[in-house]
Image (cartoon, helix red, strand yellow):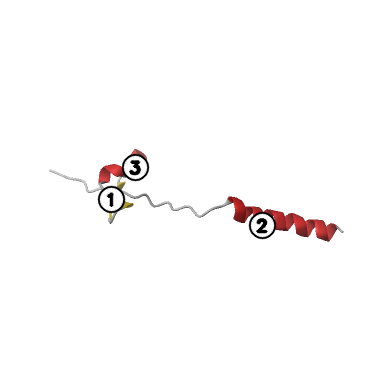
C-alpha cells in the first residue's frame, strides 16, 4: 500500500514539472542596439543587435 502511495506521489511531482514548466525563449528580438537591454554591471560585455537578436558583445575601448 505504501509503495502505491509513493508511486502516485512521484507521478504527481513528475507530471507537475511538465505542466508548470514551459520552454522559455530567452533571446530578445531587436532592430537597433537601443532595443537591447542596458546592464551596467556587465561592463565590458554589452548587448548588441546582431541579425535581429540581442547578443553579448565585448565593448571596445577607444584610447586616444
Task: Locate residue 15: give its quadrant.
Answer: bottom right
Give the Cα distance between marks 2 and 1: 38 Å
Q: Which tag, 3 or 1, sits closer to the chain's start?
A: 3
Q: Nearer the viewer, residue 46 or 26?
A: 26
Residue 5 in the image: state x and y as whole percent: 81, 56
Crowd around label 3: few <14 · some 14–19 · many ≥20 (10 Å): few
Q: Which residue is mark 3?
A: 37
Q: Nearer the viewer, residue 48 or 57?
A: 48
Q: Which residue is mark 1?
A: 49
The residue at 34%/50% (across/down) is 29
Residue 13 in the image: state x and y as whole percent: 68, 54
Q: Secondary structure at mark 3?
A: loop
Q: Nearer the viewer, mark 2 or mark 3?
A: 2
Left or right, 22 with reference to 61 = right
Give the Cα distance between marks 2 and 3: 35 Å
Q: Secondary structure at mark 2?
A: helix
Tell me the quadrant of the picture where the C terminus can be found. Answer: top left
The residue at 76%/57% (across/down) is 8
Q: Which mark is residue 14?
A: 2
Amino acid at each position: 500500500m505504501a509503495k502505491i502511495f509513493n508511486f502516485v506521489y512521484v507521478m504527481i511531482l513528475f507530471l507537475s514539472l511538465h505542466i508548470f514548466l514551459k520552454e522559455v525563449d530567452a533571446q530578445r528580438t531587436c532592430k537597433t542596439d537601443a532595443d537591447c537591454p542596458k546592464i551596467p554591471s556587465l561592463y565590458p560585455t554589452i548587448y548588441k543587435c546582431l541579425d535581429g537578436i540581442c547578443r553579448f558583445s565585448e565593448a571596445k575601448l577607444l584610447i586616444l
